[in-house]
Amino acid sequence: MDMESFMEQARVLQDKVAAAQALLDKTTVRGIADGGACIVTLTGKYDLKDLKISDELASRDAATIAETVATAFRDAKEKADATIDKIMGEATAGMPMPD
């Protein structure tokens, strides 16, 4: 592979990755805990967009609330991780890597 061809492929890859990152910024995932008592919404870049806590959960003790929020966050993060893998994998699919 000549250097010019390699540089063109690098530019194409850079454009695809930038587009994928923009898509991730607009993509949201929801993590749910305790049957919907807590819902965490994250972007594909892990930015917190929304946190909903039911009145029933809010009336519980602080430790229970904290654990439920953490559980919903972990659920959202797992979904965000899967989304990132999918979108970035599609962006880089078929791109030859240098030897």
Image (cartoon, grey):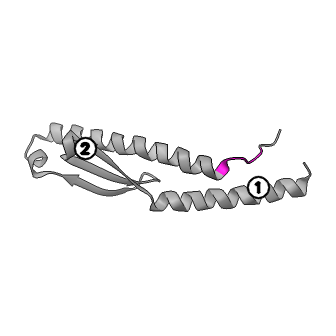
**Residue at the extreme right:** 2
Q: Position of residue 27 (x, y in %)?
A: 44, 58
Quarter of the figure with the C terminus = top right
Magenta part of the chain: 92-96
In reply to whether residue 46 is colored magenta, the answer given is no
Please tell me whether residue 64 is drawn above or below residue 4 in the rendered image: above
Amino acid residing under circle 1: Ala
Q: Position of residue 4 (x, y in %)?
A: 89, 58
Residue in the image at 60% along x and 62% along y? 19
Give how far apart the Cα atoms at labels 2 and 1 are: 41 Å
Q: Which residue, given by chain and number where applicable, does mark 1 sit on?
A: 10
Q: Position of residue 31 (x, y in %)?
A: 32, 46
Q: Which residue, given by chain and number where applicable, does mark 2 sit on?
A: 69
Judge left or right: residue 97 versus residue 37: right
- Residue 50 occupies which quadrant of the picture? bottom left
Pointers 2 and 1 in contact (C-beta within 8 Å): no
Judge left or right: residue 86 versus residue 31: right
Badge 1: residue crowd in 10 Å (few <14, some 14–19, many ≥20): some
Amino acid residing under circle 2: Val
Residue in the image at 54% along x and 46% along y? 86
Residue in the image at 75% along x and 60% along y? 11
Label located before the other in sequence (2 or 1): 1
Badge 2: residue crowd in 10 Å (few <14, some 14–19, many ≥20): many
Tell me the element at label 2. Answer: helix
